[in-house]
Every structure is written in structure tokens, then in C-alpha cells.
Amino acid sequence: MKLKDKVAVVTGGARDLGRAISVKLASEGANVVLNYFDNKEDADITLELITNAGGKAVAVQGDMTKAADVKKLFDESKKAFGPTVDILVNVVGGLVGRKAITEQDEAWYDFLMDVNMRSVFLCTKEAVPAMANGGSIINFSSQAARDGGGPGASMYATAKAAVMCHTRAMAKELGPLGIRVNALAPGMIATSFHDRFTNPAARENLEKTVPLRRQGAATDIADLVCYLASDESAYITGTNIDINGGAWFS
């Protein structure tokens, strides 16, 4: 129980990677506040998985690109588990769709930057005052931020690169407060994200060429998040950790 009695806020914590992370943190003793955008059924399933395993969690609906909804999330965390937040996991983000640069407009730019970067900015800003005794912030970047992304993913890759830089900047700013800030840069992970945006042939090709010969699993990501959330990683901050089975080396 390496996270016993810690309070963890997980944005996008109801499905796919967020669900695996929420369940993993709860299994290690954390009290989990999971955010979901619009699918209450997903949130209810995740809550059931946590409670059936003996964990504690609450679900809070909200759009993490809106400051008022972010504030509500942390207000509900305070009501459920007290004023302190020990762990923040910024999972919210997404590719949304694929568009060539000539097809993109200002609204597309704003939306991709908002969902991937503004959400991290707003949640971090709200969490820091509650991390009075130190804490751990884990952001989600992407392999796309390293290699520019696939066809039509330029703005997604750009936004995720901004998350990488923000992670480094916040590690410097918040380190004196005892707050560690790290990010993950996942490659191909078998979730609904790639079910929607990556064709099956590309996924099969990756399995043939990546050194570990498989796509990643949500549990691979959750295990790394748990490590970064715990005292086992007490001297790690400012990193952007590649987790891609060897598909790309930094």
C-alpha cells in the first residue's frame, strides 16, 4: 500500500488509461477523485471496480478546459477527502481527428491546444495550493511530441510538445515546494484512442517492428504512473519518460 491515505485527482479517469490508473492508485491505498467529461456510465464502472477492490473513490463530471469546472473538481475532492491533494494525474487530452495543415483553422488550433495543454495548465494551477506538504504531478505527453506525429497529427504533436516543456518548467518552479512534476510519452497503447485513430495495418506493423513485439497495455502505463506518484521516485522530477516498447529512443 505505497499510496495509503494519499489523495489522487485523475482527470479523464473514467476509461481506458484513466481507468487503469484510477484503479491502480486505489489498489495501492489512494483515495481517488476521478474526473469524467460526459460518460457517466464509464465513471460508474470505474467506481465499481475500485469499490469492489476495497478502494475509495468519487467521480466528478467536468470539462477540464474550463476553469470553473476545474475548480469544482478540486472543491469536490476537498469535500470527499479533505483539503490536501497529494497526486495529480493529467490524463485529459486527445488527437480528436487527423487534418492536414491546409485543412486546419483557428478553431481547430484552439481546440487541440485547449484539450491537451490548457487542461494541464488549469489543473496544475488549481492543485498546487492543495499540495502544501509536497506532492507529485504526472502529465501525459506523447511519442508524437518526440517525432512530430503521424499524418494529420501536427497540432496534436505540437500541443503534446508544449506539455513536455510545461513539465520541465513546473519541475523547476515547484521543486522548492517539494512538488515533483513528470510526464509520460506513450507510444502505441492498445486503447480506444488507437481503435479510433490508427488503422489496424499500422498497429500490426508496429507489433512486427517494435523491439518488444507488442502494443502497450493500459496497465503498463498505470504501473509507471503509480511509481511516479509514490515515494519510490522521490528524486525524479522534470522527466518526460518514453514508454513505447522500444519504438522510439530519446
Image (cartoon, rainbow, N blue to C red):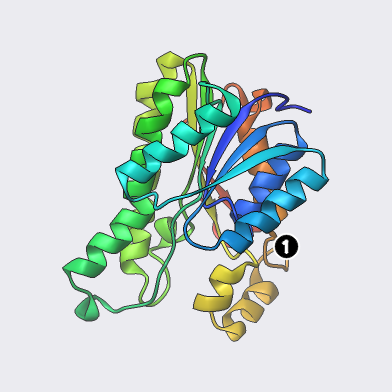
Q: Is residue 165 visible?
A: no
Local SS, label 1: loop
Residue 90 picture location, percent across and down: 48, 44
Residue lying at the far left in this picture: please name it: 106
The answer to which quarter of the image holds residue 201 is bottom right
Residue 222 picture location, percent across and down: 67, 47
Q: Give the mark count.
A: 1
Front one among 126 and 238? 126
The answer to which quarter of the image holds residue 171 is top left
Residue occupying image coordinates x 24% and y 64%: 109
Q: Is residue 170 above or below residue 244?
A: above
Is residue 180 toward the left or the right of residue 111 in the image?
Answer: right
Q: Is residue 46 above or below residue 51?
A: below
Residue lying at the far right in this picture: please name it: 53
Residue lying at the far front in this picture: please name it: 79
In which quadrant will I find the N terminus? top right
Is residue 27 toward the left or the right of residue 234 in the image?
Answer: right
Residue occupying image coordinates x 46% and y 40%: 73
Is residue 250 toward the left or the right of residue 41 in the image?
Answer: left
Front one among 123 and 197? 123
Residue type, label 1: Leu
Circle 1 residue: 212
Residue 147 picture location, percent across and down: 42, 62
